[in-house]
């Protein structure tokens, strides 16, 4: 059975989606349980796959028994093994954590919501697990289309934000498809590793060059790298919170994974880093993304919107770290895919909890939240410290690798941008702490009542809090086990030639 | 150097974190404070139990987690860390008692929160004291910054908030902006961060970069309040007085100094500092801070601000002592960590007691207060003697060694700085006491009737005052510990 794990990851949620949709008509309470079972199997299979990878280095699965380059091959190695587990865990935890909030927000639309949710996970996990460049496009579209729909299920501005995302997302995906098309013309193959074996002979070809440029552009749009980020803030702000705490951790991070995969496995490091000689310019692009994202985040007045801009800066971390083209930088980028996904989940779950209890997430609504929702805000503090980069949370350690990478590459602009962004994050998050902690202020000091703080306690229900606490504890655990993660997995994900 | 592995240092760090859930969940206030006392006593006992071992010249290690190749979150107890940990954990017990008197009498809000973050801060302080490498040090340093923020902003009013912002801006800003890159750079160059007796970067890092790194650390550890990174400390005085007393006269600020000393000796090493002439730069930075802070202190009317500026000056004594690079100067600097702690905490306790009993904060309104609060003001006198460095105040011993250090290092100018600073100290402390006791009945602002602060305030401040005299006659175990540190650092030369 365990040899079919790569198929389970995709097929089980795909089939489950249809059952969920049907259950939506028959008995709505079943939807959640079907989704939970499907995603649990998916998580279990991902975990099993990672264990297989730790033993055998690579797991290849031929869909329907057709061998590549004719059939579709799924291929799991150290790089996507770990990304798979993280994505599956996030999808599962978020599903559990948002159960109450989905019931409250979607009432009659629970069926469609969970169907889309599970399809989105199918697409995302598929992107990670596949070894076929065209299949990746198909799964990318599944993830994107369901993503548009999930975001569109929000209120008021959601439809427009989603439409904007549709335009940008489609352009991005089309660029990618075009790039793959050119590669197909040049090599006659769609299997990533097949292409990789043919490409070295024709690296000088303009077709390959063009494919490289256009693929990368498409991916940059999809991952919202500044200045192609404009779709992200609105889409993330107006989407329903149970959906965004799924989409925000996964979409952009998975796209960074795709970039790393395409550049390392298809185009090979020697082409991507050496022949193209674009490393430094891309790092500078990332520097701009970090700085501008941070500054724009400063000017926001609502929680989710601010977090969206923080994420735009975080994309810069990963892209920049990767293009440093040294071992520390790429380790940092891969580690940050994992860590950033986890901490984004944490803070967006908190945003969801807040919206569950409070009418809006603008800063005015956050007053006194530390008294009202101490546990959610406690998790928020852990998430924030991780985003700032305070040890022993995981955010510190990926930043550590990224900065050492920057120093090793002699790229001090990138080092400075990371430090700048950390400082801005301090301001951003302590502003929220200040509002949540101190306002309303004034009479408390005089009245001196000690029991007052207990009266207003009204945190999110336990079903939402427990998964959140697991995620928050996970941020610290990820930090403490960084070395295990790097020495057991990530260092093998980087090709040998990179020092 | 002999080393043993033991979990005790980790327990010493952990015990007050473990007390936090207990403090939060206990409804009855007396039991809640009981947990604080329990944690404080437990912490002190664990630390004290390790002292004999350290005095025998053995070091205790404990690895918490391996987080990066060749760098772990790791604790190591040596004589220097032990000295600092003993001082802060002992004073936590006294401060907890004082907190009860102070907070209850003033009917402060959110006392649960207050005791929680106090416990967290102490964990971080002991963590810094026992850090075996730069990463662990940074971890606990940051933890301390964040744990003390809610204490600084305790009053939650506009003043508290703006002080809180200033506090974060200086302390977190400098640690992320200056210390973090310096640490990463050293890691990149050497591949290790483990403190050693003689430093580990000599010969690896190019000499021209040494001075940048030294400055990054000296200013980056802004908790040491080396000018111009000092102005957060007077601002932090908006906190309740026990916080100012333990954290902003002992734990937090001395963590800053401790970090600087640790990095200068354990990372750079005395020989490298000497050969790169950075010792002179640090000496002048410290001496400027000493004189400037003392001059500013003269002009402060708010008692707590005057004490804060006095602290800024006294902290640089310690840095100066280390930067003299002489065995006696090092002993003097280390001793001053302990001596100044006992003296200054007494002074802050007195300031708080005066505020609790009379509501007065300003020195100009304390004329004749000695008649009303004789015990408090007598203790204030003892504390001042110690900080100025007059026998029988404990501060005399540390200043004595600092002065011997300047002679040993042949730094006459520094001798002059130390002596003139002592004069300035006397000039800003003694008039307060003089006005408090010796004034005509017409001048006196207080009735001639004894009305002291509550015993929970009075007893702790008497204890610390007695301690600071006691330390003059019997400066153990601090003296032996300081000597072990000094011998360890200078024996290799």
Image (cartoon, grey):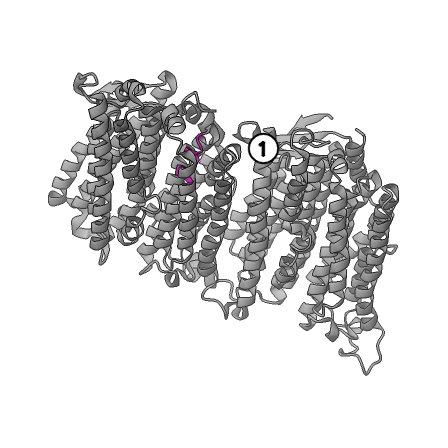
Q: Nearer the viewer, residue A127 or B206?
A: B206
Determine whether B433 is above or below A397 in the image.
below
Mark 1 element type: helix
Q: Residue at x 46, y 33 (%)?
A: A329
Q: Nearer the viewer, residue A127 or B473?
A: A127
Q: In this image, A275 relative to A112: left or right?
A: right
Q: Residue at x 76, y 60 (%)?
A: B294
Determine whether B32 is above or below B358 in the image.
above
Residue bearing mark 1: B187
Please state the horizontal and vertical placement of residue A78, each as a whole percent of the image: 37, 24
Q: Is residue B466 visible?
A: yes
Q: Which quarter of the picture shows residue A316?
A: top left
Rate crowding at label 1 as few (under 14), some (14 to 19) or many (20 or more) other CA atoms within 10 Å. some
Image quarter in which the C terminus of chain B is found: top right
Determine whether A30 is above or below A266 in the image.
below
Q: Nearer the viewer, residue A364 or B380?
A: A364
Q: Which quarter of the picture shows residue B108?
A: bottom right
Magenta stretch: helix, strand or loop mostly: helix
Q: Residue at x 81, y 83 (%)?
A: B442
Please state the horizontal and vertical placement of residue A133, each as a whole percent of the image: 24, 27
Determine whether B110 is above or below A53 in the image.
below
Q: Is residue A48 visible?
A: no
Q: Mark 1, chain letter?
A: B
Q: How many numbered marks appear?
A: 1
Give the magenta-colored segment's residue range. A317-325
Please state the horizontal and vertical placement of residue A395, each as a whole percent of the image: 46, 40
Q: Is residue A496 magenta?
A: no
């Amino acid at each position: 059975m365990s040899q079919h794990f790569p198929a389970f990851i995709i097929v089980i949620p795909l089939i489950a989606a249809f059952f969920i949709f049907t259950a939506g008509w028959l008995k709505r309470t079943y939807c959640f349980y079907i989704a939970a079972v499907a995603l649990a199997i998916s998580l279990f299979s991902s975990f099993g796959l990672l264990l297989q990878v730790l033993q055998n280095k690579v797991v290849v699965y031929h869909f329907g028994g057709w061998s590549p380059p004719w059939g579709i091959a799924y291929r799991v190695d150290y790089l996507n093994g770990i990304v798979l587990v993280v994505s599956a865990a996030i999808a599962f935890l978020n599903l559990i954590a948002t159960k109450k909030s989905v019931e409250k927000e979607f009432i009659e639309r629970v069926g469609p919501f969970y169907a889309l949710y599970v399809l989105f996970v199918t697409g995302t996990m598929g992107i990670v697990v596949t070894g076929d460049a065209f299949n990746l496009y198909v799964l990318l579209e599944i993830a994107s289309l369901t993503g548009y729909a999930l975001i569109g299920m929000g209120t008021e501005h959601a439809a427009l934000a989603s439409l904007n995302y549709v335009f940008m997302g489609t352009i991005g995906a089309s660029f990618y498809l075009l790039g793959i098309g050119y590669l197909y013309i040049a090599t006659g193959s769609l299997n990533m590793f097949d292409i990789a074996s043919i490409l070295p002979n024709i690296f000088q070809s303009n077709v390959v060059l063009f494919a490289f440029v256009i693929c990368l552009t498409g991916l940059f749009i999809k991952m919202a790298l500044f200045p192609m980020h404009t779709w992200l803030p609105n889409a993330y702000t107006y989407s329903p919170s149970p959906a965004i705490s799924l989409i925000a951790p996964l979409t952009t991070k998975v796209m960074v994974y795709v970039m790393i995969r395409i550049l390392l496995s298809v185009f090979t490091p020697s082409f991507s880093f050496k022949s193209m000689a674009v490393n430094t310019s891309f790092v500078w692009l990332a520097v701009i993304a970090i700085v501008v994202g941070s500054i724009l985040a400063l000017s926001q007045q609502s929680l989710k919107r601010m977090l969206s801009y923080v994420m735009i800066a975080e994309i810069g971390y990963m892209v920049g770290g990767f293009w440093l083209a040294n071992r520390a930088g790429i380790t940092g980028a891969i580690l940050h895919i994992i860590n950033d996904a986890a901490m984004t989940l944490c803070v967006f779950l908190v945003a969801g909890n807040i919206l569950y209890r409070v009418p809006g997430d603008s800063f005015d609504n956050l007053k006194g939240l530390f008294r009202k929702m101490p546990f959610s805000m406690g998790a928020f503090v852990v998430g924030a410290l991780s985003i700032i980069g305070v040890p022993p949370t995981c955010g510190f350690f990926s930043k550590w690798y990224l900065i050492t990478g920057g120093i090793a590459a002699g790229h001090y602009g990138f080092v400075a941008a990371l430090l700048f962004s950390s400082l801005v994050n301090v301001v951003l998050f302590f502003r929220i702490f200040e509002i949540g902690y101190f306002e309303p202020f004034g009479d408390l000091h005089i009245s001196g009542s000690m029991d007052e703080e207990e009266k207003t306690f009204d945190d999110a229900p336990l079903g939402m809090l427990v998964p959140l606490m697991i995620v928050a504890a996970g941020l610290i655990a990820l930090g403490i086990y960084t070395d295990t993660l790097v020495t057991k997995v990530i260092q093998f994900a980087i090709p040998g030639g990179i020092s | 150097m002999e080393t043993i592995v033991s979990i005790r240092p980790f327990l010493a760090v952990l015990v007050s974190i473990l007390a936090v859930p207990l403090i939060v969940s206990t409804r009855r206030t007396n039991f809640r404070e009981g947990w604080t006392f329990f944690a404080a006593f437990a912490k002190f006992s664990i630390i004290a139990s390790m002292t004999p071992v350290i005095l025998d010249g053995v070091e205790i290690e404990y690895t918490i987690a391996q987080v990066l190749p060749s760098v772990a979150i790791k604790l190591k107890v040596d004589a220097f860390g032990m000295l600092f940990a003993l001082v802060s954990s002992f004073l936590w017990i006294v401060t907890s008692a004082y907190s009860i008197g102070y907070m209850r009498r003033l009917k402060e809000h959110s006392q649960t929160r207050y005791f929680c973050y106090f416990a967290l801060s102490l964990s971080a302080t002991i963590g810094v004291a026992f850090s075996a490498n730069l990463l662990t040090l940074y971890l606990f340093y940051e933890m301390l910054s964040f744990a003390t923020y809610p204490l600084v902003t305790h009053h939650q009013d506009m003043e508290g908030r703006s002080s809180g912002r200033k506090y974060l801006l200086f302390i977190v800003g400098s640690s992320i902006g200056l210390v973090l890159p310096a640490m990463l750079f050293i890691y990149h160059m050497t591949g290790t961060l483990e403190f050693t007796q003689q430093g580990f970067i000599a010969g690896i890092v190019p000499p021209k970069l040494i001075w940048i790194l030294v400055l990054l650390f000296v200013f980056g550890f802004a908790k040491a309040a080396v000018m111009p990174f000092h102005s957060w400390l007077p601002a932090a005085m908006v906190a309740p007085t026990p916080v100012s007393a333990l954290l902003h006269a002992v734990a937090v600020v001395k963590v800053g100094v401790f970090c600087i000393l640790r990095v200068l000796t354990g990372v750079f090493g005395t020989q490298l500092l000497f050969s790169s002439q950075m010792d002179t730069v640090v000496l002048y930075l410290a001496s400027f801070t000493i004189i400037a802070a003392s001059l500013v202190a003269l002009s402060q009317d708010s008692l707590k601000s005057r004490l804060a500026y006095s602290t800024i000056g006294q902290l640089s004594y310690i840095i100066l002592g280390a930067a003299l690079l002489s065995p006696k100067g090092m002993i003097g600097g280390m001793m001053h960590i302990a001596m100044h702690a006992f003296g200054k905490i007494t002074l802050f306790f007195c300031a708080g007691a005066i505020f609790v009993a009379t509501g007065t904060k300003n020195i100009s309104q304390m004329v004749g207060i000695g008649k009303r609060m004789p015990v408090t003001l007598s203790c204030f006198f003892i504390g001042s003697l110690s900080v100025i460095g007059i026998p029988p105040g404990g501060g005399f011993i540390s200043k004595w060694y600092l002065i011997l250090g300047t002679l040993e290092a042949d730094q006459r100018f520094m001798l002059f700085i130390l002596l003139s600073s002592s004069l300035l100290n006397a000039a800003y402390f003694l008039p307060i006491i003089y006005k408090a006791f010796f004034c005509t009945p017409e001048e006196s602002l207080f009735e001639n009737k004894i009305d002291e602060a509550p015993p929970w305030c009075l007893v702790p401040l008497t204890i610390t005052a007695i301690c600071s005299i006691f330390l003059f006659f019997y400066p153990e175990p601090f003296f032996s510990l300081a000597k072990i540190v000094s011998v360890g650092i200078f024996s290799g030369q």
